[in-house]
Amino acid sequence: MGHLVDGKWSTEWYAPDAEGRFQRPRTKFHGWIRADGSTDHAPVAGRYHLYVSTACPWAHRTLITRALRGLEHAISVTVVDPHMGPDGWPFDARDPDPLGPSQFLRDVYLRAKRDYTGRVTVPVLWDRERATIVNNESREIMRMLDVECEPLATRGPSLAPPALRARIDEVLDAIYEPINNGVYRAGFAKSQKAYEDACRELFAALDRWNEVLERQRFLCGDAMTEADVALFTTLLRFDLVYYAHFKCNLHRIQDYPALWGFVRDVYQTPGVRETCDLDAIKTHYYWSQDAVNPTRIVPLGPTLDLDAPHGRTARTSA
Ligand SMILES: N[C@@H](CCC(=O)N[C@@H](CS)C(=O)NCC(=O)O)C(=O)O
């Protein structure tokens, strides 16, 4: 693990703030595919390539969006090796980089910008025609695949329909800090207080959203949206990894009937199950984050019955 400084690799983990709190740096590539032709990136089948790790909750959002919108034919994917070591994400010999001779994901970043400074994270959306990274922020890539790649989509419905978009954005904002980033703030905390604050905030938010999901099937009402995808990828990893490895252990997701039913509901949605690699998830966190787990031993359990009936189909919003 590490980052690039003026194009040179440096093996440093994230520096905490003075109170020991985890600080997530902003991603650096924020180009947009636009269907209206207003940017350099038009939605064209075969033009874009996604680099992901199936272990990563942020990258997983983009894989699910690609599957639910039927973009597999239009946007190709490379899955990196979950063993992220001192050199960052390595390519898997069984799934090499189709766009160049790359050993590590940083080679892709350097191809886009030789003097890049920043972290080398997944997901990455690459434009073959412009030979550069369009965007490396999962929330923006989700929106682009769903809305701007609509002309290429073979499945629906949209995960961000115009009438719901403002609400979806509010919910994405609301779950980001306490939940999606909250598990990392608990797990990477460098002081007792930073950990406790993050952990309490996380469970208060889980309590609230569990109540919402007792009343309605999805976070924004009756239909699945980007907000559900974003919550799902964090909750899927919760009992597997965050509960033990990140010490988010006041409750399991399985102890929240509505949240656990929601996880199974999304998991069982056609197209989603195939994007979920539970072994890669456990291997990545327990093996790669040796500051948290120095032995790198990957635990055998827990076993999750994600195929148990979710019973949420008949639920409608109030
Ligand atoms: N804000 C980014 C975060 C992406 C991110 O942090 N990905 C992690 C994997 S879960 C990563 O690649 N980490 C490598 C590193 O930080 O060195 C997004 O939402 O896309």
Image (cartoon, rainbow, N blue to C red):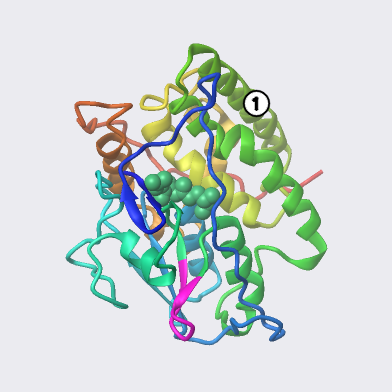
What residue did someone put label 1 on? 207
In this image, 150 relative to 307: left or right?
A: right
Mark 1 is surrounded, within 10 Å at the Cα level, by few (under 14), some (14 to 19) or many (20 or more) other residues, namely few
Q: Quadrant of the N terminus?
A: top left
Counting from the top left corner in percent of width and height, residue 142 is at 58, 62
In this image, 239 relative to 25: left or right?
A: left
Residue 158 higher or lower than 35, as above or below: above
Tell me which residue sits at (59%, 27%) in the image.
202
Front residue of this view, candidates 126 and 173: 126
In this image, 62 relative to 172: left or right?
A: left
Q: Quadrant of the C terminus?
A: top right
Q: Secondary structure at mark 1?
A: helix
The image quadrant that residue 105 belongs to is bottom left
Q: Which residues are magenta?
A: 125-133
Tell me which residue sits at (57%, 31%) in the image.
257
The image quadrant that residue 85 belongs to is top left
Ligand 1 within 8 Å of disc 1? The answer is: no
Tell me which residue sits at (58%, 83%) in the image.
43
Q: Hey, what amino acid is under mark 1?
A: Asp
In this figure, what is the number of numbered marks? Answer: 1
Front residue of this view, candidates 317 and 169: 169
Residue 95 covered by magenta stretch: no
Residue 20 higher or lower than 253, as above or below: above
**Residue 56, visible in the rendered structure:** no
Counting from the top left corner in percent of width and height, residue 223 is at 69, 57
The image quadrant that residue 131 belongs to is bottom left
Counting from the top left corner in percent of width and height, residue 114 is at 39, 67
Residue 132 covered by magenta stretch: yes
**Residue 282, visible in the rendered structure:** yes
Front residue of this view, candidates 173 and 304: 173
Counting from the top left corner in percent of width and height, residue 191 is at 48, 15
In this image, 58 relative to 106: left or right?
A: right
